[in-house]
């Protein structure tokens, strides 16, 4: 589909596996730009000229930044070195939830705090929030606002002549939010530099983490001080919310489907035996759990239209539509991953499909009917980390607690209470020790319809709220 929005260049929407295949196999290089022009809000603070997320793939700085994260963060050796940190942070998250057993827990909130600290510790050996605390949600709100501001329709993007006026105030607002993120990260960098400078002991001078590597690159002139903070903000913004939302959706789907929940828990229990804490290799070896992760990402992609690509050259044609230089190319990953031509009963949560007919389908965008991380040269560089962390968090949560859909349970509890009141014996407190009551609120943001809602009819903004309440112990 091709659209003309305002006075901006054409927008081409790719919403089938065939068109995506044509794009990624024949024209990937020519359609992998983002930055000229990028959404106005992304220009705030000049972020778009420095960030790996927004630079065009032809820019040598983009190649340099992707090279740095590929070599120093996501290479197997770097990931193996930080494994202990990730596992520790997930144990912290489980510990936080254990302390709340029997109470209503907002899993999304706790997982978000845990994911933020996991990412910040994996990269700079520092917690940025108290898990579950309001401060974590403050940071989340800032990040969510930023993503939304960048993705929402903006008059300045449609009518570039009006850009200097910033009529909707989006650039100013984005700049304020971006400043908040940068302040937190700058503080971490500043403290590391100060502690390195004041320490005489070589051992104490660094933590041997990604931040140390970045500072080394800075001292040898390969990147600037500004680059250090920008790289950190790229991985924070792109890495924490995405992991948390994916875990939250997988938990929400499992809670709605007790059979699927039972199967995956049985797999985890069988593999772990009496072991208390889950380790990354345990979680990686669980096919059903991996299938649950894939199915949750198929139904609820964190980025339903990926991030907007842009044609860097003329001469591209997709599905008979010319894609002139400067056109925006939107991949409707949400529609592709629910296309009945590719997926049987596409709207159902059926993890088994990834053990049966779609057993060969993997995350990296080779199979173009499944692109939750994108594909081609702009594919998410964080896949190797997400593939480890999401199953680890899920397996840990499912292993440590017995989860109940509290609204459903509350109905049953009323029934049990009625029976108890009429002489049924209470079944004791053992159940309650392992019970964490769950509240999850998930929303698919950045949907196609949100992006240019006035112009596109395929608006997808489902919001799922599973409202659950506490089950008092005396009902058992
Ligand atoms: C479940 C977790 C994740 C999902 C679903 C996800 C998804 C995506 C998607 C859809 C894109 C855009 C691809 C495109 O435009 O074609 C992207 C880009 C990106 N992701 Fe991820 N991501 C996840 C985790 C991470 C993590 C953990 C990191 C880093 C720590 C990360 C860093 C990035 C960066 C830096 C980009 C921009 C790359 C570029 O434009 O060149 N992501 N991700």
Image (cartoon, rainbow, N blue to C red):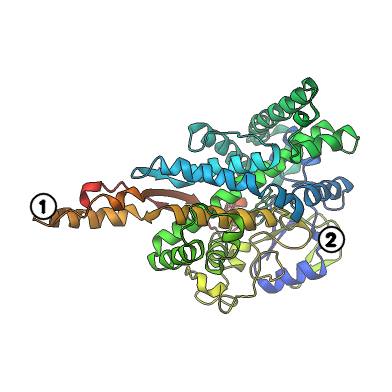
* In this rendering, position of residue 259 left or right of residue 296: left
Q: Is mark 1 within 8 Å of ligand 1?
A: no
Q: Nearer the viewer, residue 153 or 393?
A: 393
Which labelled disc corresponds to residue 273? none
- Crowding near pointer 2: few (<14 within 10 Å), some, many (20+)? many
**Dividing the picture into quarters, in which one does residue 310 lie?**
bottom right
Question: Please, which residue is most extreme toward the right here?
Answer: 221
- The image shows residue 211 at horizontal and vertical percentages of 75, 37
- Say above or below: 369 vs 33: below
Q: Nearer the viewer, residue 351 or 49?
A: 351
**Dividing the picture into quarters, in which one does residue 285 lie?**
bottom right
Residue 126 appears anywhere in the view: yes
Question: Please, which residue is most extreme toward the left here?
Answer: 422
Residue 321 appears anywhere in the view: no
- The image shows residue 309 at horizontal and vertical percentages of 74, 55
- Say above or below: 331 vs 397: below
Which labelled disc corresponds to residue 30? 2
The residue that mark 1 highlights is 421
- Say above or below: 65 vs 336: above
């Amino acid at each position: 589909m091709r659209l003309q929005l305002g006075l901006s260049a054409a927008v081409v929407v790719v919403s089938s596996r065939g068109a995506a295949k044509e794009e990624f196999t024949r024209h990937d290089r020519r359609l992998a730009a983002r930055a000229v022009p990028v959404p106005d809000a992304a220009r705030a603070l000049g972020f778009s000229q420095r960030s790996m997320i927004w630079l065009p793939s032809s820019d040598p700085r983009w190649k340099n930044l992707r090279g740095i994260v590929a070599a120093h963060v996501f290479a197997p050796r770097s990931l193996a070195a930080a494994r202990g940190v990730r596992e520790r942070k997930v144990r912290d998250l489980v510990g936080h939830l254990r302390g709340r057993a029997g109470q209503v827990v907002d899993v999304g909130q706790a997982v978000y705090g845990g994911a933020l600290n996991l990412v910040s510790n994996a990269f700079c050996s520092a917690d940025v929030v108290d898990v579950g605390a309001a401060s974590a949600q403050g940071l989340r709100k800032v990040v969510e606002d930023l993503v939304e501001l960048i993705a929402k329709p903006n008059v300045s993007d449609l009518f570039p002549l009006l850009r200097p006026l910033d009529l909707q105030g989006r650039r100013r607002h984005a700049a304020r939010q971006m400043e908040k993120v940068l302040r937190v990260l700058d503080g971490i960098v500043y403290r590391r530099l100060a502690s390195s400078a004041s320490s005489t002991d070589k051992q104490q001078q660094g933590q041997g983490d990604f931040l140390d590597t970045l500072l080394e690159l800075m001292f040898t002139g390969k990147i600037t001080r500004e680059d250090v903070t920008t790289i950190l903000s790229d991985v924070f913004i792109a890495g924490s919310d995405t992991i948390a939302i994916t875990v939250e959706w997988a938990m929400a789907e499992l809670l709605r489907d007790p059979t699927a929940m039972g199967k995956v828990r049985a797999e985890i229990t069988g593999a772990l035996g009496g072991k208390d804490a889950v380790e990354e290799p345990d979680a990686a070896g669980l096919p059903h759990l991996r299938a649950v992760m894939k199915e949750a990402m198929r139904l609820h992609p964190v980025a339903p239209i990926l991030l907007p690509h842009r044609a860097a050259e003329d001469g591209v044609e997709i599905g008979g539509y010319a894609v002139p230089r400067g056109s925006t190319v939107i991949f409707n990953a949400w529609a592709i991953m629910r296309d009945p031509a590719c997926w049987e009963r596409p709207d159902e949560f059926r993890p088994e499909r990834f053990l049966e007919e779609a057993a060969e389908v993997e995350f990296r965008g080779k199979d173009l009917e499944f692109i939750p991380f994108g594909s081609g040269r702009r594919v998410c560089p964080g896949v190797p980390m997400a593939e480890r962390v999401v199953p680890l968090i899920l397996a840990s949560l499912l292993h440590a607690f017995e989860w109940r859909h509290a609204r459903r349970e509350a109905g049953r509890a009323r029934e049990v209470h009625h029976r108890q009141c009429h002489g049924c014996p209470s079944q004791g407190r053992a159940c309650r020790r392992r019970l964490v009551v769950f509240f999850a609120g998930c929303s698919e943001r950045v949907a196609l319809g949100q992006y240019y809602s006035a112009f596109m009819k395929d608006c997808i903004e489902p919001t799922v709220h599973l409202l659950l309440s506490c089950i008092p112990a005396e009902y058992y």
